[in-house]
Image (cartoon, rainbow, N blue to C red):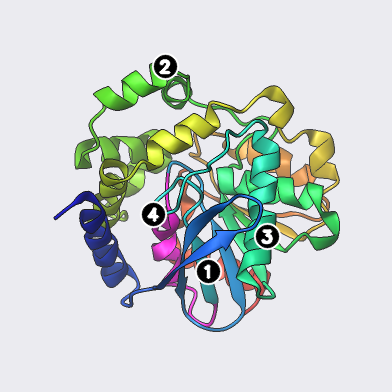
Amino acid sequence: MNDIERFRAAEERLWAETVGVRPFERMVPLPGLDIQVRVLESGGGPPLLFVHGGPNAASTWAPLVAHLAGFRCILVDRPGCGLSEAPRKRVTSVRDFASGLVAALVESLDVTLEGVVASSFGSYAVLAHALTDPDHGMPAVHFGCPALVPGSRLPIAFLLRSLPGLGRVLLHLEEPTMATALETFRRIGHGASIDSGRVPEVGIEWYATLMACTRTRQNDFALFGRARPRDRVTAGDLKRIAARTSFFWGTNDVFGGRTVAESVTRLIPDARLELIEGAGHLPWIDAPSRAGRHVRAFLGG
């Protein structure tokens, strides 16, 4: 079994145990980026676009999709992640790349989206798109701290891995295994859920296989290493967000906890916030049914 077959097998187990059905898979060309990205679809009803953070891939959302019956969940492997192609051109502006990605997805999917669900770098991309094209900003549910917003921070372990040269050495030395995957989940605030058995082992196994069998972490850390101060979303930017916005945010999010959550929410006009005590950076993993209720309450269905 080669690496891609191993990854697909782990992904199939994740969906079988968390959702109970396999998603439909297709490759979608992105205009302007000259690449194809893999899109997974599950369910029927009002369509929602899901944009993950990193390093990660589309199937990270499977525990949440299990609680979103009645929606057409459209999950994308971001460029360079999972089984999507990596960008062919060097990214010179992370903000322009992120905004352009969302615009390209909206154009290529050719559906009228009910809203977008995003996390971390995916949330940053959605916010950047809403600022670039305010007339077409979609209602958005953001899970956890978006990247590059006021008050957010990059823990030292992630900062070192995004540095050119040193990052490649560290990634080479850190062999992806179940143990290192568990350590990553603890590092981003999910230790309590792991210890209580709320994070299914099949999810950790899928993540470890994603890291071992694809170039997701190498590609994403290279992208993050290109971010510059000019790429950040400022307080003034957030005040200009016109799209309906809601946050589902864990208090143990190492990229920005309660204080950052409340500050960011106050800056965006009419934004809503649901804080989850003890949850980490990917809070739908800690509380999937509650996360599903949040999406339903905000986006309908």
Alpha-carbon neighbours of circle 1 within 10 Å: few (<14), some, or many (≥20)? many
Dot 3 or dot 2: first in sequence order is: 3
At 22% from the left edge and 58% from the top edge, which residue is drawn? Answer: 5
- Camera-side residue of 262 and 94: 94
What amino acid is labelled 4 in the image?
A: Leu
Start-end of magenta stretch:
56-71
Residue holding disc 3: 140
How many angstroms separate mark 4 from mark 3 (CA)? 25 Å
* Helix, strand or loop at mark 2: loop
Relative image position of residue 135 (x, y in whole percent): 85, 60
How many angstroms separate mark 2 from mark 4 (CA)? 25 Å
Q: Which mark is residue 118?
A: none
Image-based side of 263 in relation to 250, left or right: right
Q: Which mark is residue 165?
A: 2
Of badges 1 and 3, nearer the viewer stands 1
Q: Quadrant of residue 293?
A: bottom right
Quadrant into which the C terminus falls = bottom right
* Helix, strand or loop at mark 4: loop
Residue holding disc 4: 83
Dot 2 or dot 1: first in sequence order is: 1
* Helix, strand or loop at mark 1: strand
Image-based side of 107 in relation to 159, left or right: right
Q: Quadrant of residue 287?
A: bottom left
Residue 273 seen in the current view? no
How many angstroms separate mark 1 from mark 4 (CA)? 15 Å
What amino acid is labelled 3 in the image?
A: Ala
- Camera-side residue of 188 and 170: 170
Dot 1 or dot 4: first in sequence order is: 1
* Helix, strand or loop at mark 3: strand
Residue holding disc 1: 74
Of badges 1 and 4, nearer the viewer stands 4
Of badges 4 and 3, nearer the viewer stands 4
